[in-house]
Image (tube, rainbow, N blue to C red):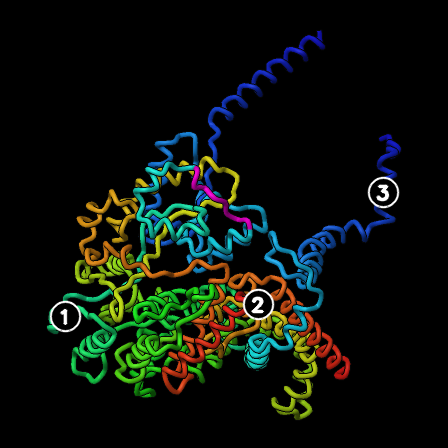
Amino acid sequence: MKIRKLARLFAVAMVLVLLSTGVSIAQEKTVVKIAGPWVVEAPESTVLDVVISGFEAAYPQYKVERIGFPSAQTAQQVQTMAVAGTLPDLVITNGSFNAAWKEMGIVSDIRSSFTEEFLSDIYEPMLDAFSYEGELFGLPTCAAPFVLLLRKDLLDEAGIAVPQSYDEIQAAAKALTVDLNGDGTIDRYGMSLMGFPDSNAQLRFTVGLFGCNSPDVYIDENGKYATAIGTEDSLRIFNLYWNLAFVDHSIPEGCTEVDYKTMVSLLSADKVAMAFSGPHTIGNIVSQNPDLAGKFIAVPVKDLSKVAYLNPYGFVKLNGDNDQGAIDFLTYAVQNFVEMTKITKRPPALKSLAEVAAREAPEAAAILDCADYNINYLTLPFRNEVNQVVYEKLNAMMAGVYASPAEAAEDMRVAVQAVLDQYNK
Amino acid sequence: MRILPPLKGEILLRNFLNRYFTLVFMLPVIVLLLTLIIYPMFYGFYISLFDTNLLNKWNFVGLKNYTNLLSNKEFQSSLAVNLKYILGVVTGHVLIGGFLAVQLNKAIKARAFWRALLMLPWLIPEVVWALLSKWILNPQYGVLNYTLMKLGILDQSITWLGGLTTSLPTVIFTSILKGYPFVMAMMLAVLQTVPGDIYEAAAVDGCKPVRAFWAITVPTIIPVISIALILDTVNWFKHYTMVSIMTGGGPAKSTSLVSLTIYKTAFESFKFGSAGSMAVIVFAICYFFNILYRRLDKINE
């Protein structure tokens, strides 16, 4: 009797266990892990939330898990996760680490996961930025171009045309540096330069180098890595930084303390009129100070050449646990990231969204074609080493270490070439 | 009431505990130490013998990473900056922490309030402290420059964190303010063990407060100073967070501490072997400080 009772109880328990397992199996969703700065940065996180909600509705079998960290920590976070064996499926970045990550075995070619027709709708320079040696490691969703950002209302008020050269930028900055209330102190400076030793400062300066036909790294006629830093042309950008800081004093004191957040604060607080940055910064400024809506425009950097660093941002697929989920999300995200253009003024990666971009981001109208004059910013396994040298020497120049811009240029050239020589061997 | 004889298992357990009592209670700590300190330490030394990215490149280079450090000017310059930094920070902690500990040991009004208030910097996370300091010191909208200019002390704002001559002293100052409560708490703890009778007896014998400080207080706190120095030196020698946020090692590497150099070598240049060798050297230096302070302590005894 007892045995029969026990057997009955056991059978009921088994049925309950099986039922609950079945229910949980039916409800269990595949987790797609996405990591990167847009998870924690405003207003980008709002756009990401919308895209993720849309994706989860369109693909009910997936659940997206977010992991946030600042953009400056992308490389170290991803590599640490790779060492720990906890790589997410996708990371939000600009593709600049692809060469290094390929060497480390963190990323793999995903070109065959998409049709040529699908890929052909993406601007080619943007797609190139997510490729290395013919292999594709992710997809861009939008660009965050580095161009010249300026207060059009102030330029118009002062009767100054949009600058077409570094000399004109210097002159405009000088004219826009003003004491508004006559108390003897400057209330608004013409320009903000970033001098904090990080990659944000380096990228802006590097765009300036390309503007005077002086790439930081190029491959010479012998197939070796070389730098044009230190050439006569390159001095034009060194002179611009030098003159703004030490001759005209058209930038706020403490340039070496200015990182991206500080620069955005200065622009939002109406303390400066121009900066090397992109339309995405307009989104940040307006979110901090809505009174400045419609007052900023983005224009190409112009000197000896008209340039922009396209800086396509999107998702790189890492060798995580869920390949198909990552590919499905990539496919969905690229086609549904138009909110990013509306909110942050970033040009979209898809050609088919060009009209939407023109309508939604008139501030960026002058640079919507920036893919056509994107700089040839080489993807290199040792890219970070070069960048580190550039931002450290730039920081030293802005701190007043050198006697002249030519001396700063020469010191930067020697240091960059020393890095390149290691890899030329 | 009948007392049942102990079960066999109970006897075995009791015997085992009697025999290995110490080991049983130390085991959790030993496991934690092995997994969180000893293993990473030896692994750090192990990777310093390789040219590695920790993933798919493991080229054994022997002691090459160490010999390269002899000609690595960046590392040597970082060590020099670190020594200046540590000298300033630890001295500041001992002076300010010691002074405040002595004051808080006196029968002052609202002593509990002051003790809680002065411990606050220690409770604030380093990231928050660094960001607050950065904003306070900002040359454009920082409250420090604004106040000094309003008071007529300054004609124009100073770039505290951006100037070649001001950045390191400023970073040292903010680090002192962040870390002094640790030394203060240690000294206060030992000061409270000194019976008030001794001071009263000394006063009766005509001993002035200054003399009492040197004759009673200082000998009491010297052994604690030694421990505080070891812990504070080691803690701040490998400091990273605040300096990274406030200056990023600039301007012109004037605040480039060795931890920043190690971090950049590992995570920006992906040279983990080289970074590992630097970390081993830092460990050796910290260990040297440990031995030095212990020797000084013995001499004092």
Q: Give percent across and percent down for residue B218.
A: 66, 83
Q: Quadrant of residue B278?
A: bottom right
Side of B178 relative to A238 (left or right) = right
Kind of residue at badge 3: Arg
Q: Circle 2 is placed at which residue position?
A: B262
Identify the residue shown where x is 75% and y is 83%. Answer: B300
Residue that lies at the very extreme toward the front in this rendered image: A222
Kind of residue at badge 2: Ile
Q: Answer whether residue A109 is magenta in the image.
A: yes
In this rendering, the answer to whether A210 lies above or below A189 is above
Chain identity of mark 3: B
The answer to whether any part of residue B99 appears in the image is no
Identify the residue shown where x is 66% and y is 91%. Answer: B207
Is the magenta region chiefly helix, strand or loop?
A: loop
Q: Circle 1 is placed at which residue position?
A: A161
Q: CA distance from mark 1 to mark 3?
A: 91 Å
The answer to whether any part of residue A156 appears in the image is yes
In this rendering, the answer to whether A361 lies above or below A257 is above
Closer to viewer: mark 2 or mark 1? 1
Closer to viewer: mark 1 or mark 3? 1
Q: Earlier in the sequence, mark 2 or mark 3?
A: 3
Identify the residue shown where x is 71% and y is 10%. Answer: A2
Q: Nearer the viewer, residue A105 or B282?
A: A105
Chain part drawn in magenta: A105-112
Chain identity of mark 2: B
In this rendering, the answer to whether A13 lies above or below A28 is above
Q: Circle 1 sits in a helix, a strand or a loop, which is it?
A: loop
Q: Circle 3 is placed at which residue position?
A: B14
